[in-house]
């Protein structure tokens, strides 16, 4: 069996299978860890295929924000599929007031654009 890093499409499949929010976040962090270990020239390949719907709009939009954020760091345009995924009402994944305030101030631009307020520090700490 050969190792293959998780793509955003793979991540969407995991998010669809697991309803437990804590497990879903573990999948997100695992994706980010695998992404970080990939050589720079192969990272874009993990982001380009459109993920299937997860059944929950907030998670679908999170995937779009993640794709846009990571492609910007590669100095690339976001995938076309990510552009239309935007929440009408902002989503703060954390219910802690201090984390919400931190996310308001530190959420990366791509996440704010899509309506997902997640601190940049949370993405790096994964």
Image: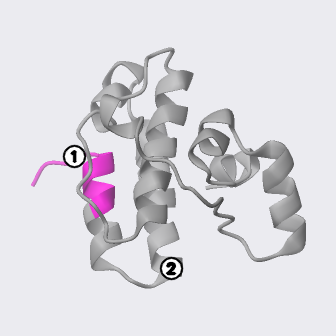
Question: In percent of the image, x 27 and y 30: which residue is there?
Answer: 45
Q: Which label is found at residue 21?
A: 2
57 sits left or right of 7 in the view:
right
Q: Is residue 3 above or below residue 82?
A: below
Residue sitting nearer the eye, 44 or 59 = 59
22 sits left or right of 16 in the view:
right
Instruction: State the residue position of label 1.
Output: 4
In the image, farthest residue toward the left:
1
> Looking at the image, what colour scheme do you see?
one colour
Q: Is residue 58 above or below residue 36?
A: below
Disc 2 residue crowd, few under 14, some 14–19, many 20+, Cα 10 Å: few
- 2 or 1: tag closer to the N-terminus: 1
Q: Quadrant of the N terminus?
A: bottom left
Q: Is residue 6 visible?
A: no
In the image, farthest residue toward the front:
88
Question: In percent of the image, x 42 and y 35: which residue is there?
Answer: 83
Circle 2 SS class = helix
Q: Position of residue 104 (x, y in %)?
A: 82, 51
In the image, farthest residue toward the top:
75
């Amino acid at each position: 069996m050969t190792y293959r890093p998780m793509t955003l499409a793979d991540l969407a499949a995991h998010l669809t299978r697991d309803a437990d929010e804590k497990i879903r976040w573990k999948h997100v962090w695992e994706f980010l860890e695998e992404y970080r270990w990939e050589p720079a020239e192969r990272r874009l390949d993990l982001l380009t295929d459109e993920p299937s719907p997860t059944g929950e709009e907030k998670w679908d939009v999170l995937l779009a924000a993640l794709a846009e954020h990571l492609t910007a760091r590669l100095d690339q345009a976001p995938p076309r599929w990510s552009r239309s995924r935007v929440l009408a009402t902002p989503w703060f994944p954390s219910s802690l007031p201090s984390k919400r305030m931190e996310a308001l101030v530190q959420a990366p631009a791509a996440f704010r654009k899509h309506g997902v307020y997640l601190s940049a520090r949370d993405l790096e700490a994964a």
